């Protein structure tokens, strides 16, 4: 659902050159806060430039088509790229994939690649992606005013990025907090 909103916002920005928070809210029926978060997420991915009250499209970016359109266009070429990419991966590699139609096809190819099966029969690589449905964050504390906290600034930045990319965030409470359920 969030990805559909982001795709729609990109299409609006591509058509108009600029989109406001109010336009996003009205077009998608979201809250102002959700519209701002979505625009921020697109800006963080460098798909739009965030402006006061909205966002501007990036010149020359080919994001006017929906993901569904992209998935059916050049499917043969995308599959060939996925096979060639998969051939470069070896057992023991850590593979990072971002979101998109080509990388989705790469993930499918990795899942069925016989050369990546380890001696014990498991897949012999680690896959890391920013295309999340749920982000699970381990934290050092939970504060009513500041939310989830950690003393490590780098870890906090990564947590914010994961949370922005996910549809849902689960916070795993610190050990001994008595927090019980996440």
Image (cartoon, rainbow, N blue to C red):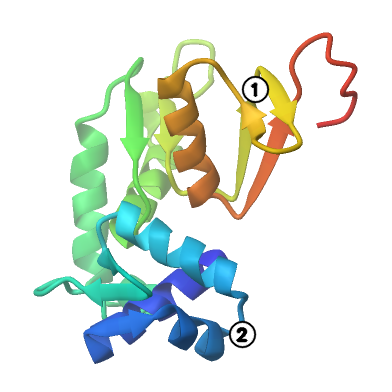
Q: Is residue 172 above or below residue 108?
A: above
Residue 137: percent from left, percent from top? 62, 30
Q: Is residue 86 left or right of residue 104?
A: left
| Quadrant of the rendering where the C terminus is positioned | top right
The residue lying at 40 percent from left, 78 percent from top is 9
Q: Earlier in the sequence, mark 2 or mark 1?
A: 2
Check disc 2: other Cα within 10 Å, few if <14, some if 14-19, many if 20+.
few
Q: Nearest the camera: 113 or 4?
A: 4
The residue lying at 27 percent from left, 58 percent from top is 79
Check disc 1: other Cα within 10 Å, few if <14, some if 14-19, many if 20+.
some
Tell me where residue 25 sits by quadrant.
bottom right
Residue 111: percent from left, percent from top? 45, 39
| Quadrant of the rendering where the N terminus is positioned | bottom right
Residue placed under numbered mark 1 in the picture: 139
Tell me where residue 110 sits by quadrant.
top left
Q: Nearest the camera: 30 or 116?
A: 30
Tell me where residue 179 sits by quadrant.
top right
The residue lying at 76 percent from left, 23 percent from top is 173
Q: Is residue 69 left or right of residue 118?
A: left
Residue placed under numbered mark 2 in the picture: 29
The residue lying at 70 percent from left, 38 percent from top is 145
């Amino acid at each position: 659902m969030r990805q559909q909103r982001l795709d729609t916002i990109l299409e609006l920005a591509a058509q108009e050159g600029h989109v406001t928070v109010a336009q996003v809210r009205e077009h998608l029926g979201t809250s102002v806060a959700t519209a701002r978060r979505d625009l921020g997420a697109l800006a963080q991915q460098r798909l739009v430039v965030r402006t006061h009250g909205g966002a501007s499209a990036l010149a020359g970016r080919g994001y006017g088509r929906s993901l569904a359109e992209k998935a059916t266009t050049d499917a043969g070429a995308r599959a060939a790229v996925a096979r060639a990419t998969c051939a470069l991966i070896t057992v023991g590699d850590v593979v990072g994939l971002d979101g998109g139609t080509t990388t989705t096809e790469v993930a499918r190819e990795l899942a069925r690649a016989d050369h990546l099966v380890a001696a014990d029969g498991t897949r012999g690589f680690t896959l890391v992606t920013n295309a999340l449905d749920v982000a699970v964050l381990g934290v050092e504390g939970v504060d009513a005013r500041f939310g989830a906290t950690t003393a490590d600034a780098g870890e906090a930045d990564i947590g914010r990025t994961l949370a922005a990319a996910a549809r849902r965030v689960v916070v795993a409470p610190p050990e001994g907090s008595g927090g019980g359920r996440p």
